[in-house]
Amino acid sequence: MKAHGTAHKYGDNVDTDVIIPARYLNTADHAELAKHCMEDIDAGFTAKIKPGDIIAGGANFGCGSSREHAPIAIKASGISCVIAATFARIFYRNAINIGLPILECPEAANDISDRDEVDIDFDTGIITNITKNRTYKAEPFPDFIKDIISAGGLLNSIKKN
Amino acid sequence: MTITQKILAKAAGLDTVRPGQLISAKLDMVLGNDITTPVAINEFEKNGFGSVFDRTRISLVMDHFTPNKDIKAATLTKQCRTFARKYDILNYFDVGDMGIEHALIPEKGLAAPGECIIGADSHTCTYGALGAFSTGVGSTDMAAGMATGTAWFKVPSAIKFELSGKLPPHTSGKDVILHIIGKIGVDGALYRSMEFTGSGLSSLTMDDRLTIANMAIEAGAKNGVFEVDDITREYLKGRVSRPYTEFTADSDDDYDEVIKTDLSEIKPTVAFPHLPENTKTIDEITEKVPIDQAVIGSCTNGRISDMRKAAAVLKGRRIAKDVRCIVIPATQSIYLQCIKEGLAEIFINAGCVFSTPTCGPCLGGHMGILAEGERAVSTTNRNFVGRMGHPGSEVYLASPETAAAAAVKGYIGSDIFAL
Ligand code: SF4
């Protein structure tokens, strides 16, 4: 499993309220949620994202409420992976459970700049910053997490097996 | 390895695990309540899982809005009841034999040392008091847990809390955990385990420990866990007959940090709005903070020793004229015990409401909602904006003894124990 795209850089403590504001939680429609992704922190987000792009965040990414809508909005907007120094615990679970790959790698999270071109190999955990010509190492996913993500989420992967 | 790491290794069928490692673990219990279970049932049914992994290892507890507070709540509970009947869920607890889940599960012997438990409720961490690994998850996890009996985890690192000494008068487990959260902050244990050991354990009752483990989540922790000792074993007698495993940590080197706490230095502690970390010890509260309501109950402090401590303060006294005091034993058996011991009478004579078990006001559900500008002292665990009602209301977190004394005085202040 691989990902490749342009990185969009954010700071520490990106909370679930800015990822998807509560005023849009009256819908569970993925495309609708994607339209408002990151709206309160980066109004141009949806316009600039190309499928496959990557989010690079700082510490405690996804803190706040336990809403599963937050990783859903990110995934539905076309983001292929979120790299952060650390993730809030429930966001981390929810992201994997809905099939959004996320990698914890403080080194990469700090070094990647906005608009850097990044390549990710989920099998090895190697993150390559093509723009800066540097590599970073994250913990690779074990097979069962890979299964969850490639099936599109936890419940799909259970059904498949 | 830490206690948590050893439990997770066993549940994953591995010899060792290391922090950050992702594992798939076998679950001993999957828990849900009347709010979270319907969401999980929807997922379960939408995905066509035709069966549950083990009808004896799922616990569904109708506690938040029960006895049903409105039609919406009644509909949700009905959905849970129908599901429980369809799959013949053994541990389904409804009005008449329910209790607040985190008081009920230990009481019924449904959690034991070394077990691995998930619950779609953030205070599932409570059972760490018994030496179990237990943690709160989302509804997708609960649905998957019910279907497969497994969950994935990222192995946490841990902070060791080494307790020594003995608690002074007017203090209890609630003051210990408020003290710790005040010290390390609401993200002080983010992602990590809080593991409690040391000579001070011998002076902490099981109820103290359940209160402490209950609020591990308020420090951001994944779980809180206590080393098993004679007090634990005594509690488990007559409740748990299945074999269980006790784990101890290998060495201090396995921990990120060791924090030492001398219990003899703990003072009655109150968390001011709107975060559990905004703590002051009672002697630091120089002003008088008038209160409109006192709530004594919840999964944090609705156990029999909490009821006894509150009753000891209220015996022969009346609560202040302008205060409403709501006492809610956490389970049916605690409720009955309160009646047998004459505590119910003490509460009622003091001018309190004495309610059937429910989460009720703790989450601003029912049975004591605050109006704008009102202020409550409460033995619950969260004092976020609007937690007990109007966003313009305030919640002060404290122990049952402190809350009862404040109810008598009509305010929170440094002299409340001079009754
Ligand atoms: S008593 Fe409060 S904190 Fe405990 S389970 Fe009920 S709502 Fe949650």
Image (cartoon, coloured by chain):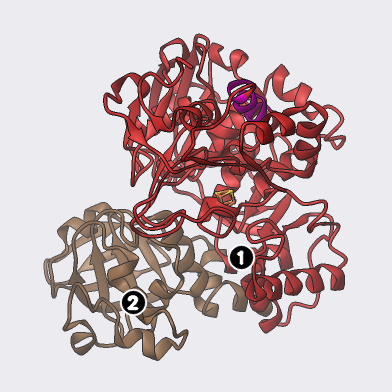
Chain colours: A brown, B red
Q: Position of residue B36 (x, y in %)?
A: 61, 65
Indicate the amino acid at tag 2.
Ala
Q: Position of residue B258 (x, y in %)?
A: 40, 23
User: Residue B241, relative to residue A90: is it above or below?
Assistant: above
Residue in view at x 67 percent, y 32 percent: B349
Binning the other alpha carbons within 10 Å of mark 2 as few (below 14), some (14 to 19) or many (20 upward) gives some
Give left or right: position of B110 versus B347: right
Give left or right: position of B74 versus A1: right
Residue in view at x 74 percent, y 77 percent: B49
Same chain for labels 1 and 2? Say yes or no: no
User: Residue B338, relative to residue B266: is it above or below?
Assistant: below
Q: Nearer the viewer, residue B124 or B241?
A: B124
- Residue A3's tag is 2
Which quarter of the figure has residue B267?
A: top left
Q: Secondary structure at mark 2?
A: strand
Which quarter of the figure has residue A5?
A: bottom left
The range drawn in magenta is B305-314
Q: Nearer the viewer, residue B64 or B135?
A: B64
Q: Nearer the viewer, residue B251 or B298?
A: B298
Give left or right: position of B93 versus B357: right
Was residue B33 drawn as part of the magenta stretch in this picture?
no
Indicate the amino acid at tag 1.
Thr
The subunit carrying tag 2 is A
Was residue B306 drawn as part of the magenta stretch in this picture?
yes
The subunit carrying tag 1 is B
Q: Secondary structure at mark 1?
A: helix
- Residue B36's tag is 1
Judged by depth in the image, the label closer to the viewer, 1 or 2, is: 1
Q: Position of residue B186 (x, y in %)?
A: 36, 42
